[in-house]
Amino acid sequence: MRPLVVTARNKSIEQKIIVCLFHRYATLVMSTNNNNKMCSSKSSKASSISSSWFYFIAILPLPLLLILYSQLLRSTIAPPPSDHGTGSMFDIIATRYDFINRALALNLDMGWRHRLVAEVVGSNGELFTKSQEDVKLLDLATGTADVAILLGKAAAKYSSSSAITINSAVLGLDPSQNMLNVGKTKVQESDLANIVTLELGDARKLNALQDDTIDAATMSFGIRNVPEKEQALCEINRVLKKGRMDKGWPASPQLAIMEFSEPGDDSGVMGSMARAFIRHVIPSMGALLSGAPREYMHLQKSIQEFPSPPEFVKLIEGVKCPIKSTEDDGEVQIFGRFRVKEVVNLNFGSVQIYLATPYLNKYVTE
């Protein structure tokens, strides 16, 4: 028997077969349900129970179909490189990014972003109300500006409550121009153009920002797309203000990073379900909804390869960002570093918020 040679054409045919199965399954479900409604002669209560069982039985094959489709994607599409999560990748999916995000996260993602912003600004807006000077915020990998807009709304709400008049500004940076274009429209619609500014930028090269000028920085679902994570963390450390703990500043951290991770084997039933969701539902549904399967294969791959929460905490606290100066008693080696204050686990361990504060280490050498 001749071995089957899988060509690009065969791959395309297989993909079409799986998509066709989805469409036929949906058509079958809808037509059967309509027939049930027309032919039903039972009481409304019995009909409601029957309809509930019908929908329950109807969705049972869906997980299997999604798993089959995700496996097909892995076998027919070349795996994306580790640095695929750049601006050009997100340019492709920018116009549908928000819709797909809400669908894949079951509309929970905005709740996670609200929690991120609350951790940064404080439960009662302490970041603004207790500040004695203008507040500058930085949102990296801002994408379509969801977090930047939430920060802008918090700034508009609490800046006027400060003991003195302060001006607040939010700068959102992202390497994808198309994502920023969507975000700029949303900023205008939110009437925040006087507070929120969006610009092209790379977390690894914040050259336009001066040292010790940013009050707080956020990054949601972006750090895993940065190959040189230590370089990005050092740039963030450089631009963040230090020493606020010494001034009696309350518990608000100055860096908040939100990121996905695969729940471990010890995460229980719900964690196992979340892990299966990340591995199979995200790439298959993302591919179907966006028409860009390679991009959503990268999403799943980047989550799977991202360090576990303990490993990422170790990475954050392990960075040593050199700053050199000279004093009379010898050369002083100054390093910018982070101390992780808390890790907030969300969504059964598949989403974490890392809350960190920058500080300086001094080493004197004779």
Image (cartoon, rainbow, N blue to C red):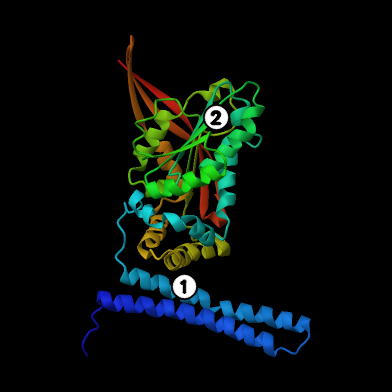
| Amino acid at circle 2 | Ser
Q: Which residue is mark 2?
A: 168
Q: From where the camera sits, is residue 221 visible?
A: no
Comparing 95 with 42, the one in front is 95
Whether pointer 2 and pointer 1 mark residues with C-beta atoms closer than 8 Å, the reply is no
Task: Tell me: 276 left or right of 159.
Answer: left
Label located before the other in sequence (2 or 1)? 1
Q: Residue at x 39, y 72 (%)?
A: 71
Comparing 37 with 267, the one in front is 37
Residue that sits furthest to the left in the current view: 2
Q: From where the camera sits, is residue 243 visible?
A: yes
Residue 235: % across, % down: 38, 33
Q: Residues within 10 Å of mark 1 (few under 14, many from 20)?
A: many
Quadrant of residue 231 within the rendered picture: top left
Quarter holding the N terminus is bottom left
Q: Residue at x 40, y 25 (%)?
A: 211
- As helix, strand or loop, the secondary structure at mark 2 comes to strand
The alpha-carbon separation of the residues under discs 2 and 1 comes to 46 Å
Between disc 2 and disc 1, the foreground one is 2
Q: Which mark is residue 66?
A: 1
- As helix, strand or loop, the secondary structure at mark 1 comes to helix
